[in-house]
Amino acid sequence: MRFTFLLKIAALTLWRSWRASVVLLFMVISAVAALVFLSALAVGTNDAMIRNSTGLFSGQIAGTGIQELEAHRLQIPGVKQVLVRRQQEILLGTGESLESVVLMGVDPAGEKEATAYWKKTLAGTYPASGEEKIFVSQDTAKRLKLAIGDTVNLLNLKGLPLKTLTIAGIYRTGISHLDQGLAFCPAQALPEGATDLSVAVFLQADTLLESIVTQYRQMLPLASITAWTEFMPDLKQLIDLDAICMAIVITLVFAIVSVGISCTFLIFTLKNLREHGIMKAMGVLPGDTALLLMTQIGLLTVFAAAIGTLAGFLTVALFSQRGIDISAFTSHNQYFSVSGILYPRLTGPALLTPPLVAILFGLAAAIWPTIYIIRKNPADILRSV
Amino acid sequence: MIRLQSVCKLFISGRGHVQALSEISFMAENGQGVILVGRSGSGKTTLLNCIGTLELPDSGAIYYNGTDICRLSLRRRTLFRRQEMGFVFQAGNLLPWLTVAENLQFPLELNGIRGKAQRGRIEELLATFGLTGYEKALPVELSGGESQRIAFARAIAHEPAILLADEPTASLDSSTGKQLVELMVSLCQTKGTTLFIATHDQELLAMADTVITLKDGKMEQRI
């Protein structure tokens, strides 16, 4: 049979048996739309976790062993901001007690632009450039019994006084490595001799992390350049786990949907059993029968997958603007320390996997009814219906 | 020429064994009209199905122009049916999701008759059966008589060598049925098509060259 004629027969069968077609279409459209949205939501959740984790303080790339002059070369296309931080291990002391901290000398304006930890200020303000002030964590402030406006002595590790700074602000991020043993001051307020330098690189949206890391490693072979995937392996694993869970969800949903499609399509095929018997009697070969049934389900699932993808795309477009606020469920979650708003985002795989899986499972679902019809003798069909 | 030689068919069901056909042997020349008569369950439909290769006999042979068509592979048997056979069933013959013209197009497409030849043949068939103007009608919009006429038209569209009709007038009133069979017989005679009709209708017997009476799967009489 000519394929164009077979296609016409398949299309007319679906068009003129519209009730059954609508049921099948609805099943596939709703599954595809839901999974496109779910995939985009999973991407959005991962984005939010990365954004929160890297945007709080560390940036997407961390560099150490870099000279100050070299740090300025890191501002390459795709990089939003490079923050240079000097650091010195010191003792903070009041009359009564001492605490060992790493004091970070930062560019306050740059930090405010790129990071979010300064937004976690509980009292006072984040120090401004040129001020002889310090920004300490709530834990440090409690231990040293410090309040806003108090002065604190900076001592070297041998206990020799270096200088005195005023408490500008007290913060709490909820993340232990930032809340313990760390304090911030403007770079020029650091005591003399602070030579350790680190950089935090913040990338523009849609910049490929690996590409920038590779370029940096080529530019500065002696420096230590690490991507967030290396210095936050827990987050990397969590995102990989999300991807696996999503794949399982897609497979399970379509396995269930395909059983539904298969049953509905079998009923649809059985409803037309006599017609298949007549066609077989007229000389339609088993291969043509199989192709006809596969084409029917193929047309249906391709059409439904396209509509479902569009529906999913529009839903994602709506929520990607408005966002989905899940702050109530993330207040104690370190991966959502900055914001609990998710913005679903469509990627190529998130957009294409559900419709492709739908078509694949749809065709798989047609196998059973096809085998059933092919194996039936035309005389048996005509006798039984 | 079609020749049946000791054709037997046994059905096994939960109610036991039923000998549907037993030692059926006869011959029909090209262009001959053969009517199979007998009560319900006498084996008429089974015999038509065997001649039409819709099912295979358990033993015996059916020769068409010297070839035992029961020994053909499934594919060759299907292609043989496609090219050489036309079928009319009792009712519900038409493909409901296709229009009248599309139903007629079906056997023509299967047999590679396309384009102008196809359109011309469809118009000719509609005119012959008095259904010009019904091209775009769906089967559900036709009366029983109109449906059966389209079924006949479709069965002979590709000019088969053998036409098999199983109770073709059962769903029609007697005068419509008679007219239709007369037309069919006349067309088959013109084209040299061998016609097999299974029927209860005694009025049709006069139109046949040969009448075969079946009883309990056995050939009781041949006139």
Image: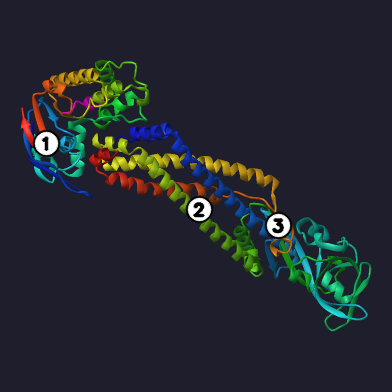
**Chain under numbered label 1:** B
Q: Amino acid at mark 2?
A: Val
Percent across and percent down for residue B192 are 12, 23
Residue A191 visible here: no
Give the quarter of the image for residue B8.
Answer: top left
Q: Circle 2 is placed at which residue position?
A: A253
Q: Residues within 10 Å of mark 3 (few under 14, many from 20)?
A: some
Comparing marks 3 and 1, which lies closer to the viewer? Answer: 1
Query: Are tags 1 and 2 found on a single chain?
Result: no
Q: Is residue A110 above or below residue A153?
A: above
Residue A293, image x, y percentages: 36, 41
Identify which residue, B188 or A235, lies in the foreground. Answer: B188
- Residue B46 highlighted magenta (yes or no): no
Q: Which mark is residue A75?
A: 3
B206 relative to A139, above or below? above
- Given the image, what chain letter belongs to the residue carrying mark 3? A
The residue shown at (66%, 47%) is A320
Q: Are marks 3 and 1 on the same chain?
A: no
Helix, strand or loop under label 3: loop
In the image, A251 versus A98, the foreground residue is: A251
Residue occupied by mark 1:
B215
Distance CA(mark 1)–CA(mark 2): 57 Å
Per the model, the C-alpha gap separating discs 3 and 2 is 45 Å
* Amino acid type, residue under disc 1 in the picture: Lys
**Badge nearest the viewer, 1 or 2:** 1
Does the image show residue B131? yes
Q: Residues within 10 Å of mark 1 (few under 14, many from 20)?
A: many
**CA gap, disc 3 and disc 1:** 99 Å
Which stretch did the figure color magenta? B154-161
> Which amino acid lies under the numbered mark 3 shown in the image of this protein?
Gln
Quadrant housing residue B115: top left
For discs 3 and 2, the disc positioned in front in the rendered view: 2
